[in-house]
Image (cartoon, grey):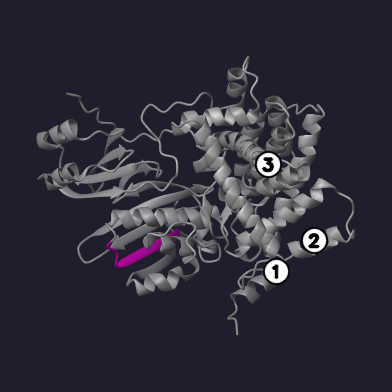
Amino acid sequence: MREISWKRHLAMATPPSIFNDVIGPVMRGPSSSHCAAALRIGRMARDLMGGRIERVRVEFDSRGSLAFTHASQGSDMGIFGGLLGWDAQDERLLDSAAAVERAGIQIDIRIGDYGDAHPNTFRLTLSNSRETHRMIALSTGGGMIEVVAIDEVPLSIAGDYFETLIAVRAVDMDMHETLKRNVAAEEILLHTGRSGTLIEIRSREPLSAPVAMRLAGLKETVWMRTLAPVLPVLSRRGLQVPFITCSQMMEWNRGRHLDLAALATAYESARGGGAEGEVEDRMREIVGILRRSLSQGIAGTRFADRILGVQSAGFKSAMQNGALLDAGMLNAMIHYVTALMEVKSAMGVIVAAPTAGSCGCLPGAVMAAADAMGRPERDMARALLAAGMIGVFISAHATFAAEVCGCLAECGAGSGMAAAALVTLAGGGAQQAVDAAAMALQNVLGLICDPVANRVEVPCLGRNVLAASNALACANMALAGYDAVIPLDEVIETMDRVGKSLPMELRCTGLGGLSTTPAAKAVEKRLSSPQI
């Protein structure tokens, strides 16, 4: 009979997944860190309450980014949708506030001085007539989340397992024997805090009904809930990846001579536990979603609550009429990038790549280049996989959260990823691809985040175009043999250090940069005025 090794809480980083952390989520809304992450947090909160919610208090720290952006960047919408059990693509999200009210859930949003260290901290107090629970969760960038406390008990839940939580008075022999004999889990953790003790059971499938009923019926059990995973790729016990830095990857590739797309496929296969063909098929599905989003953008989008109207149509017309300077493939990229950004601003379905704020750069650059070169969707998928590998290194050693590192973490990261993707699309090798990414990231160090009127439109659209332009230039430089000088791993470390050195006002809070200009304030006033 196996013994249980009770593990205390220890924050250990799980290797990023291309489909969890980098290319995704598939979503609606202006911001992945504010909208998609909020929705995932809301879904986990719903599970914590067993789906029975009557009142919710949502609290944001006055010094964090959410105090300024929770309404305009979709955090309220995301939380409401999650509390209702919706997913991030749901077309009803725009109606989520009314839907929550119809469902009889009372919402109280407060801004206060809570001393939260992370700028994207959600504090939820959830109650019904029988119970109350408290949850503290973080949006860590690109739609990723971490629940860090439940009922004042510290823990770490990322949404990559079925998480069965059991609040207990004590762990007696009956509880221990039941777990030992009946529970096949990836991990069983014991957490203690001010309010008591929680047993956390991590598994890749929900516990069977008989086992769940037995655990719930034990005399020491106070309450029990299962939180379903919110990420597409689950984790597992003993998870190992072949490399987690660029230098490790290049050493692993010595003698194999794989390009960056093949290396990414090998990595993600090990990370997700599936065959390499499954990884490629999943990315081709994402290419299909991107194609549909691009078609919607090119056809034209309409949405009242945004700063910019449709501009990509005018660019296409000018391009076709010869009114533009000859920029070749770059003009096609500008057209595609802006069309995708307009879909995002119109609450259409997009793919965060790596974030919603930077959703135009990488896909727009890759699809425009592939179309200009006559390449099929399989080649686009391989290029996106190559980009995903660069994103894994950034996710593991820096961040995609603008609130932490400015726009360098969003459009900057997207530019480095796109540069590697374009090299791969052109048939370049792994070293050329990582050199292109290194050069692209070097060019945008210190890029601030200053969205006008807290909408992810201005200067975000232009930054996405800048990112794609930078990516194309650096891809060609790498293909021509230019020396990146600084290795990618060192550039990523510098990116993280420089981004965190930016003043808070320049990291996505609407307190600095273009967002404070008179023109920006006029836009903000116009958008906040009732529409007649």
Q: Earlier in the sequence, mark 1 or mark 2?
A: 1
| Mark in front: 2 vs 3 | 3
- Residue range corresponding to the magenta coloring: 52-60
Residue ID for mark 2: 315
**314 vs 420: above or below:** below
**26 vs 439: above or below:** below
| Mark in front: 1 vs 2 | 2
Q: Report if residue 389 is visible in the image.
A: yes
Instruction: Indicate which disc residue 309 carries.
Output: 1
| Residue pictured at 66% horizontal, 39% vertical | 417
Residues under numbered marks 1 and 2 in contact, where contact means CB atoms less than 8 Å apart: no
Q: Which of marks 2 and 3 is nearer the N terminus?
A: 2
Residue ID for mark 3: 376
What kind of residue is marked 1? Answer: Gly
Q: Percent position (x, y) of residue 429?
A: 71, 26
| Residue pictured at 65% horizontal, 67% vertical | 301
In space, the residues marked 1 and 2 are separated at their CA atoms by 13 Å
| Mark in front: 3 vs 1 | 3
The local crowd at label 3, few if under 14, some if 14 to 19, many if 20 or more residues have their Cα within 10 Å, is few
What kind of residue is marked 2? Answer: Phe
Q: Quadrant of the C terminus?
A: bottom right
**371 on left or right of 417:** right
Q: Quadrant of the N terminus?
A: top left
